[in-house]
Amino acid sequence: MQSRITRRAVVKGGLIAGAFIPAIGFLSETASAAALTPLDPKDPSAAALGFVADGTKVDAAANPTYKPTQKCGTCAQFQGKAGDATGGCNIFVGHSVPAGGWCKVYAPKPA
Ligand code: SF4
């Protein structure tokens, strides 16, 4: 017995797969964001890099390179999207940081 795959079946299958693939990506992104734990400023590595959850509370005298425009949300290490309240950080793996946070290794996202 020989089975025939029609062009209509191939197109229909492709359309169904195309509808689900973005949904799967969204679900895995949501699940991975939920798996991150908020970075505690008292964490030894966070404290060593002067991490603060609120960038307006940076001790400017102790951090002379700090500028008020520097925030996690505009840092090259921030893994969230523009407008996200929190996101992962390449430096503090497994943790999320607030978009308004800051630490000493801040570097602006490339334009
Ligand atoms: S490396 Fe960037 S995103 Fe990560 S905590 Fe420091 S300033 Fe925020």
Image (tube, rainbow, N blue to C red):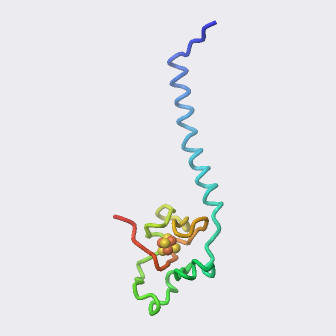
Q: Is residue 16 visible?
A: yes
Tally the numbered discs.
0
Q: Is residue 59 left or right of residue 30?
A: left
Residue drawn at point x = 55 percent, y = 21 percent: 9
Residue 38 on image: x %, y %: 63, 71
Residue 86 on image: x %, y %: 56, 67
Q: Nearer the viewer, residue 16 or 108?
A: 108
Residue 32 on image: x %, y %: 61, 57
Tell me the quarter of the image containing the N terminus. Answer: top right
Outermost residue, top direction? Answer: 1
Q: Is residue 72 visible?
A: no
Q: Is residue 8 above or below residue 44?
A: above
Q: Nearer the viewer, residue 72 or 65?
A: 65
Q: Is residue 98 above or below residue 3?
A: below
Q: Is residue 111 above or below residue 60?
A: above
Residue 21 on image: x %, y %: 56, 40
Residue drawn at point x = 61 percent, y = 73 percent: 39
Q: Is residue 8 left or right of residue 94?
A: left
Q: Nearer the viewer, residue 60 or 69?
A: 60
Residue drawn at point x = 52 percent, y = 64 percent: 84
Residue drawn at point x = 47 percent, y = 69 percent: 73
